[in-house]
Amino acid sequence: MHSTVDNIHFVVRGHGDSALYELPPPPSGQRGRPRTKGARLLTPEKWAAAHPDAFESVIVSMYGKDVPLQVVSYLGMAYRTLPGRLIRYVIVKDPHGHYRTSYLMSTDPNMSAAQIVAAYSHRWPLELTFQETKQKLGMQDPQTQIPRSVRRTAPFALLVYSLVVCWYLASGHLEAQAVPSYPDPWYDKAGRPSFTDMLATLRRLGWAQSLLDPALQHTPRSKNLYHFLIRVASTA
């Protein structure tokens, strides 16, 4: 049974060989079990090959910049996953041919192809948040089995992540200017700070107030030792 909730929609990655159908025809009044699916449609991959002139050029805001793409979409029913409900399948091509063709699907058939592509690009910061929460804050480390503990572990780690980011945006970015650093040559100085930078700044300022930060002391005679202390303090 498919969901009847209409105020929540999903945009996910699809497959080029997905089996799609038309909606079943209305009951004819004849005896027997009513049809549950209509005529078989072309797979997205074959549909794109059969309609090369249907693609349109659009500019989609994604990953912080405007990206030119070629998109096309059509409606179909995924019988195995969402029977009785139309979904919009989107086929995305790179006009320069550098990237392979992508297939997306949305449970909201009223969304345009460009809107679906833009919405799907929002998944990247979410995945990055979970990755950094696991690697930098240890969300995946606790060995919990009690249901209440399991439900509390991830939200607490995400809360700490949010507090670090909010602190850096509110005042941490100003205090970070007083913290000496020695970025690697490949570090983009003009780019925005990563969560690792925010967390390192918070730790170093906390050490300087409560204990000491070796890199904040008077510069050692050896420049190599000075750079080593800064890197240790930043990555600890």
Image: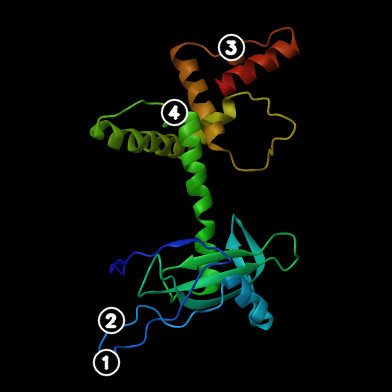
Label 3: state its secondary structure.
Answer: helix
At label 1, which amino acid type do we have?
A: Gln
Label 4: state its secondary structure.
Answer: loop
In the rendered structure, find residue 138 and report the number of the disc placed on it.
4
Q: Distance between the residues labelled 3 and 4?
A: 25 Å
At label 4, which amino acid type do we have?
A: Gly
At label 3, which amino acid type do we have?
A: Pro
Q: Which of marks 2 and 4 is nearer the N terminus?
A: 2
Which mark is nearer the camera, 3 or 4? 4
Q: In this view, does 38 lie above or below 210?
A: below
Q: Residue furthest front?
A: 32
In the rendered structure, find residue 21 and report the number of the disc placed on it.
none
Taking depth in this image into account, of 170 and 203 the one nearest to the observer is 203
Q: Which residue position is annotated with label 2?
A: 33
Q: Which residue position is annotated with label 3?
A: 214
Q: How crowded is mark 4: few (under 14 residues within 10 Å), some or many (20 or more)?
A: some
Q: Which of marks 3 and 4 is nearer the N terminus?
A: 4
* Label 2 with label 4: CB-CB less than 8 Å: no
Label 1: state its secondary structure.
Answer: loop
Quadrant of residue 69 within the rendered picture: bottom right
Which mark is nearer the camera, 2 or 4? 2
Taking depth in this image into account, of 150 and 64 the one nearest to the observer is 150
